[in-house]
Each structure stands twice: as C-alpha cells, then as structure tokens.
Image (spheres, helix red, strand yellow):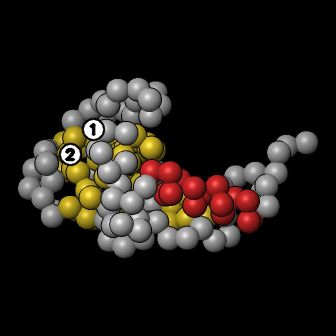
Amino acid sequence: MALQYSVAVNNARLDAVESTIGTSAILKIRTGAPPANCAAADSGTVLSTVNLPSDWMAAASGATKSKSGTWEDTSADATGTAAHYRIYASDGTTCGEQGTVTATGGGGDLTVDNVSFAAGQAFTVTSYTKTAGNQ
C-alpha cells in the first residue's frame, strides 16, 4: 500500500516549508537548469533577486499552499531567459527550495509574466502553488 497522509498532516508539512526557510526569504531567478539539489552550488546567471514578503506563503488549506502578497521586481539584475529559481533563507545563501520557472500557463513550479528578462525590466511572479501528495 502506498503511504498516505491526512489533509491535516499534509497542511502541516506544507506550512513547515515556510517556517523552516523563515521570514525575509529571498527569491533568486536564474538562467539554465537547476542544480542537482539545494545542497549543490548555485548555477546560471542571477536574473532577479526578490525580497519576499515577511509572510510569503498563505496558510496551507486542502493540502495546497500558495504565495502570499506580491512577488515582483521593479528592476531585473541581468538579461537572459529565466529557467529555474531558488528560495533562500534571509542570509541569501542557504537554499531551502528550488524549481523550474516558466511563463504563465507553462507548467513550471513558479510562473512569471515573461521569461525573457532584460536588465532593468520589471516582472511579476504570477503563480506559485505547492500541493502535498500522498493523501
């Protein structure tokens, strides 16, 4: 039998992501493929650095958890094509999560309004939702 959790347990697992990474988390959007895991060295060019809202994720409900507040950058750091992201603790170096970036509707772990970044360009994260499995 496959391992199964209740919705309440899955909500707690999802809420632990935000509490473990902490408040004042930092999102960095980068070019290229993501590293093998969060313990591996950063890769790609940093296109954008976003200081996330203090409460950057809404409380989990129904075994899903979504971004909270506005995630945007008024001036991208560099020019390139967004392909992956990392969310760091407030120190900007301790990776807590990484995933893929696509344009809205592209199916990435995090979606933005446009994956073609130009230095100085504004952009917005349009979607970021996590769903717990094993229900």
Question: In the rendering, at what x and y percent does residue 82 appear?
Answer: 28, 45
Residue at 36% x, 46% y: name it: 88
Question: Looking at the rendered structure, which numbered label has been put on residue 47?
Answer: 2
Asked if labels 1 and 2 touch by Cβ distance under 8 angstroms, the answer is yes
Amino acid on which disc 1 is placed:
Thr
Residue at 70% x, 52% y: name it: 133
Q: Residues within 10 Å of mark 1 (few under 14, many from 20)?
A: many
One can see residue 103 in this view:
no
Q: Residues within 10 Å of mark 2 (few under 14, many from 20)?
A: many
Q: Which quadrant of the structure image shows residue 100?
A: top left
Question: Looking at the rendered structure, which numbered label has been put on residue 61?
Answer: none
User: Image check: 66 left or right of 93?
Assistant: right
Q: What residue did someone put label 1 on?
A: 31
Comes first in the chain, label 2 or label 1: 1
Work out whether 57 lies above or below 116: below
Work out whether 117 lies above or below 74: above
